[in-house]
Amino acid sequence: MVPPQNTTALEGSRVKLSCQAEAFPNNVTYDWRHDDDAVPPTSRTTVYADGSLVFSSVDVEDDGWYTCRPTNGLGLTPEARAYLNVTCESPSHSSARQNHRKSQLPLSHDYTPQFMTFFLN
């Protein structure tokens, strides 16, 4: 499994969080979560067949932990997490973003996703 990487992006920019897994049979689907809630497909978010989660334009509300769970329906489902840090230039958004993040920030931004190898039967 190739896990997503912690990412910092400017509000309004395009962001791609990658997550790739190999399995047999190779009918892998990907479940993405944002702070433990499912990431719904929207006009701004797309999950591609290769497992990538792409934001056409990130917003401060997209800031937080993202978890990727690849599965082919067999065996245990692995997962990997990464933190998306969305920055903004507007002073009016800055205070709203700080209030939003007070309860969201992990104890350390130095979280490094662990590489995992898994086999699905």
Image (tube, grey):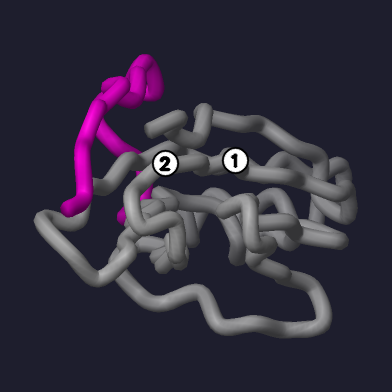
**Residue 96 visible here:** no
| Nearer to the camera, 121 or 52 | 121
Measuring from the top left, give residue 11's x and y in whole percent: 81, 50
Q: Residue at x 81, y 40 (%)?
A: 10
Residue farthest along the left direction in this orientation? 76
How many numbered marks does the figure carry?
2
Q: Amino acid at mark 1?
A: Ser
Res. 9 image quadrant:
top right
Packing grade of label 1 (10 A; few <14, some 14-19, many >=20) is some
Q: Amino acid at mark 2?
A: Glu
Mark 2 highlights which residue?
A: 22
Secondary structure beneath label 2: loop
Is 8 positioned to the left or the right of 102 in the image?
A: right
Q: Residue at x 31, y 61 (%)?
A: 71
Q: Residue at x 29, y 37 (%)?
A: 106
Mark 1 highlights which residue?
A: 18
Which portion, as a residue range, is magenta? 102-121
Is 120 positioned to the left or the right of 81 in the image?
A: left
Secondary structure beneath label 1: loop
Measuring from the top left, give residue 16's x and y in whole percent: 72, 45
Image vertical order of residue 13 relative to residue 111, above or below: below
